[in-house]
Image: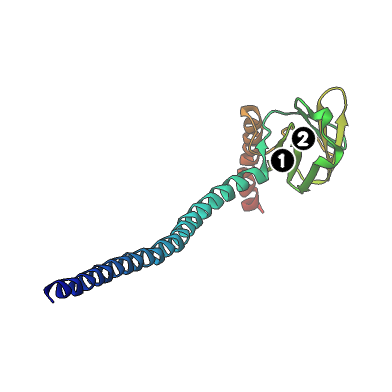
Amino acid sequence: PKRNFGLCRRPRLLAAALSLLVACLGFMAEEATGEAPPVEEKEEKKPVVYEGAAAGKYNWDDAKKGENADKDIAGEAITKYSWSDGKKAVSIYIELEGLDEVADDDFTIDNTERSVTLAIANLGGKKKRFAMSGLSEDIDGVKLVRKKGKETVVLKLNKKEEKSWWQLTEKTSGGGGEDDDMGGMGGLGGMGGMGGMGGMG
C-alpha cells in the first residue's frame, strides 16, 4: 500500500510541474504579445513627429527659396553703359559678353515718360536688368536695336520734344550741369530788379 501511495503522488507532482510549465509559457506568450503593440505605437508616433519637424524645415526652406526668388525676379543689375544724344532720340549703349547669343524673345523693354527698363531673361543662364529713372526729359517710347557681332544692344529713347539733352538723368548731372543750372538761376536772380520795375509801374 505504501508503494502504491508513493506511485500515486508522483503523477501529481508531474502534473503540477506541467501546470507550472504551461503557466510560464503562457506568461511568456503574453509578454511577447504585449510588447508588440508598443512597438507599433512607436512606429506610428515617429512619422507624426518627423512630419512635424519636416514640415517646419520645409516651411523654412520655402521661405528662403521665396527670398531668393524675389531677388531673382529682377535679375542682376546692369551698371555699365554709355549714351549719346541725337536729334529725335537718345541712345543708351549696353555691351555684355554673350548678348549675341540671347534670343530676341528674352529681351523685354518698358518705359514711362521719365524711366526706361530692359530685362534680359537668359544671359548665360542668368537674368540681367537695366533700369534708369529720373530721365532729364520726357520720352514717348523706347526701341531696342541689336548690334550683332559687337555683343551690344542699343536702347533708342524717343524724345517727346526735339531738343538737346545735356544730361541723361537729373540725378547724374555733374558739376558742370549744376553750374549751368545755377547759372540759369543766377540769371533769374537778376530778375529781382524787376520787382523795382513793378514799383515803377
Residue shown at 74% from the left, 31% from the top:
124
Label 1, label 2: how far apart the Cα atoms are: 7 Å
The reply, left or right, for residue 13 in relation to residue 139 is left
The reply, left or right, for residue 54 in relation to residue 4 is right
Q: Please determine whether, in this image, residue 176 is positioned above or below residue 160.
A: above
Residue shown at 75% from the left, 41% from the top:
119
Query: Could you say where residue 81 lies in the image, as x and y percent from the top left?
Result: 72, 29
Question: Mark 1 — residue?
Answer: 136
Question: Element at badge 1?
Answer: loop
* Residues tagged 1 and 2 counted as in contact (Cβ below 8 A): yes
Specify the amino acid type for callout 2: Trp
Q: Quadrant of residue 170?
A: top right
Query: Could you say where residue 107 lies in the image, as x and y percent from the top left?
Result: 81, 40
Query: Could you say where residue 151 lies in the image, as x and y percent from the top left?
Result: 81, 25
- How many residues crowd mark 1 within 10 Å: few (<14), some (14–19), many (20+)? some
Name the quadrant of the N terminus: bottom left
Return the disc, 1 or 2, that comes first in the chain's sequence: 1
Residue sitting at the far left? 2
Residue 165's disc number: 2
Residue shown at 81% from the left, 27% from the top:
152
Q: Please determine whether, in this image, residue 29 is positioned above or below residue 97.
A: below
Name the quadrant of the C terminus: bottom right
Q: Quadrant of residue 169?
A: top right
Residue 3's disc number: none
